[in-house]
């Protein structure tokens, strides 16, 4: 599949700058500024956010990590606008799996909010340092893309 580089402004005001496939879909590395001001930078596959990328939301929250078909999926770091963060596993656009919550003051709570999560709710406490480190490593790789 051949790719082309370019820019396109959508009718709603969103702007994409990056690579396109031969069918006119966002494909490869690029950046998308949505009409609400949210910004995505990273990889696209057949029009969807894919593989590695970052989203900066207008409320100040951000996600750096893995994507599948346009959703948070895999490992990543989500930081809310108040600096509360989750580092760990995501599935279908939601926190789901092993990880850790850090509060704005840097603490993890008592008892420690580390384990298996469904949304921001901890379902089972367990230590998962490897998953946490891998999520941090993915976020570091996203920042290194420097898109």
Image: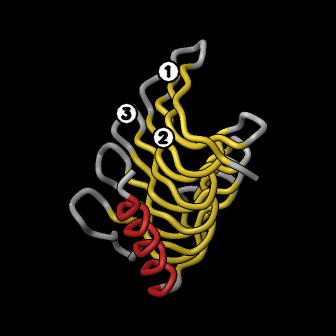
Residue at the disc numbered 1: 35
Question: Where residue 31 is drawn, which disc sits there?
Answer: 2
Which badge, 3 or 1, comes first in the chain's sequence? 1
Q: In the image, 10: left or right of 92?
A: left
- Does the residue at mark 3 contact the one at mark 1 (Cβ under 8 Å)? no
Say the numbered circle drawn on residue 59: 3
Position of residue 107 in the picture relative to residue 54 (left or right): left
Residue at 57% x, 14% y is 12
Residue 89 x %, y %? 57, 68
Local secondary structure at mark 2: strand
Q: Residue at x 33, y 38 (%)?
A: 60
Asked if marks 1 and 2 touch (Cβ < 8 Å), the reply is no
Q: Secondary structure at mark 1?
A: loop
Camera-side residue of 66 and 15: 15
Dot 1 crowding, Cα within 10 Å, few <14, some 14–19, many 20+? few
Residue 111 location, quadrant = bottom left
Cα–Cα gap, marks 3 and 1: 14 Å
User: Of all residues shown, which one is farthest toward the left?
Assistant: 105
* Label annotation for residue 74: none
Mark 3 or mark 2: name the one nearer the start of the chain.
Answer: 2
Q: Residues within 10 Å of mark 3 (few under 14, many from 20)?
A: few
Query: Above or below — where is 137 with respect to 121?
Result: below
Q: Classify 80 as above or below 118.
A: above
Q: Secondary structure at mark 3?
A: loop
Colouring scheme, one of rainbow, by chain, secondary structure, one colour = secondary structure
Residue depicted at x 47% and y 46%:
41
> Which of the two marks, 1 or 2, is nearer to us in this view?
2
Q: Do residues under tags 3 and 2 come within 8 Å of each other at their CB atoms? A: no
- Residue 100 image offset from top left, x and y in percent: 44, 71
């Amino acid at each position: 599949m051949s790719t082309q580089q370019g820019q396109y402004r959508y009718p709603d005001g969103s702007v994409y700058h990056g690579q396109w496939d031969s069918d006119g879909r966002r494909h490869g590395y690029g950046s998308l500024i949505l009409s609400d001001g949210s910004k995505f930078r990273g990889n696209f596959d057949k029009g969807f956010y894919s593989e590695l990328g970052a989203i900066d939301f207008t409320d100040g929250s951000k996600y750096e990590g893995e994507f599948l078909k346009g959703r948070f999926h895999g490992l990543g770091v989500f930081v809310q606008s108040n600096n509360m963060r989750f580092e760990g596993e995501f599935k279908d656009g939601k926190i789901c799996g092993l990880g850790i919550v850090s509060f704005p003051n840097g603490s993890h709570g008592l008892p420690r909010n580390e384990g298996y999560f469904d949304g921001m709710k901890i379902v089972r406490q367990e230590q998962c340092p490897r998953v946490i480190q891998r999520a941090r490593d993915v976020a570091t790789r996203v920042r290194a893309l420097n898109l």
